[in-house]
Image (cartoon, grey):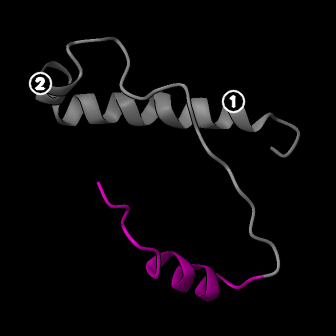
Amino acid sequence: KPDHPLSTLIGNLKTVSSRLIRKEFPGLASKYFYNKPYFWTGSYFVASCGGVTVEQLKKYVEQQTTPEN
């Protein structure tokens, strides 16, 4: 619903996806996350891109370069 905070939506998505990933790939938690009770960090990023089409946005993302290490 539009009256719910975006942070609540993101938290719910992370909670559900974490449960599904842990259920399907139980070895990931012990191998990569040291058996901690969390899968994702508390951080997230949200941006809007009004005024462009989905195709324009897709083209923009595809043309991004990979950062150098």
Categorize mark 1 by other alpha carbons within 10 Å: few (<14), some (14-19), many (20+). few
- Quick check: 24 left or right of 46? left
Residue 15: x and y in percent read 48, 27
Q: Who comes first in sequence, dot 1 or dot 2?
A: 1
Q: Quadrant of residue 20?
A: top left
Residue pointed to by mark 2: 31
Q: Quadrant of residue 38?
A: top left
Q: Nearer the viewer, residue 13 or 33?
A: 33
Q: Quadrant of the N terminus?
A: top right
Is 42 a magenta residue? no
Assess whether mark 2 and mark 1 are in contact (beta carbons under 8 angstroms): no
Residue pointed to by mark 1: 8
Determine whether the residue tagged by mark 2 lies in a helix, strand or loop: helix
Residue 67: x and y in percent read 38, 61
Q: How many circles with numbers are drawn on the protein?
A: 2
Q: Nearer the viewer, residue 54 or 65?
A: 65
Is 68 a magenta residue? yes
Q: Start and end of the magenta stretch?
A: 52-69
Kindly identify which numbered label has been placed on residue 47.
none
* Front label number (1 vs 2): 2
The amino acid type of the residue labelled 1 equals Thr
